[in-house]
Amino acid sequence: MELIHSLSFVLNVTVVILGSVMKLPQVVKLYRSKSSEGISIWGSFLELACFMTGSGYGYSFAYPIHAYAENIFLTLQGFSIIYLAIVFGKETGTVAISIFVLYPSNHCHTVIVHLTSSTYHHTVSSVST
């Protein structure tokens, strides 16, 4: 049984190490080319949401750090890709800035719903006046 736990730990650490460098070639290519051509910003947001969810889930249920650390590294790399895509691309970046600001919040979904509903109410009240 101890062999299985040791093997599991080694595999977890391997995944963390590989996950920590998985997107670095893309980040380097974006930075060197100074172009975000071919990058789907919405696909990157979706991928980032998955990594953030995995990180939050592992943290909130107090899993050992090696069980979800690759998601933390991939989240940071995802932020880098989105940032570079906005800087070197033609996207406006409004949504990206919102995500960057909202990420540290533990109640991210609540904040997004609140912002969406208050924007909607503000827009409706502006139109009606």
Image (tube, rainbow, N blue to C red):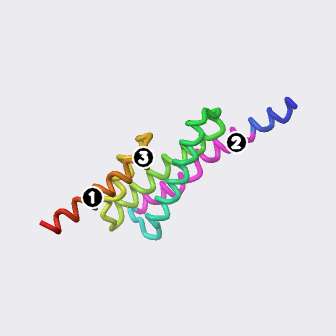
| Whole-percent x, y for residue 79 in the image | 44, 51
Element carrying mark 2: helix
- Which kind of residue does numbered mark 1 sit on? Thr
Comparing 114 with 68, the one in front is 114
Q: Which residues are magenta?
A: 11-33
Q: Would residue 66 be counted in the magenta stretch?
A: no
Callout count? 3
Q: What residue is drawn where x is 25% and y is 60%?
A: 121
Comparing 15 with 129, the one in front is 129
Q: What residue is drawn where x is 48% and y is 55%?
A: 27
Circle 2 crowding by C-alpha within 10 Å: few under 14, some 14–19, many from 20: some
- Which kind of residue does numbered mark 2 sit on? Thr
Element carrying mark 1: helix
User: Which of the 4 quarters of the picture holds residue 5?
Assistant: top right
| Whole-percent x, y for residue 37 in the image | 43, 69
User: Which of the 4 quarters of the picture holds residue 107?
Assistant: top left
* Residue occupied by mark 1: 119
- Give the Cα separation between the discs numbered 1 and 2: 44 Å
| Whole-percent x, y for residue 25 in the image | 54, 55
* Residue occupied by mark 3: 108
Q: What residue is drawn where x is 30% and y is 64%?
A: 92
- Which kind of residue does numbered mark 3 sit on? Cys
Question: Does residue 58 appear to the left or right of 90 in the view shown?
Answer: right
Quadrant containing the N terminus is: top right
- Give the Cα separation between the discs numbered 3 and 1: 16 Å
Main secondary structure along the magenta-highlighted residues: helix
Question: Does residue 121 appear to the left or right of 21 in the view shown?
Answer: left
Whether the residues at callouts 1 and 2 have beta carbons within 8 Å, the answer is no
| Up-down relation of residue 4 to residue 101 (above or below) | above
Identify the disc placed on residue 11.
none
Q: Would residue 20 be counted in the magenta stretch?
A: yes
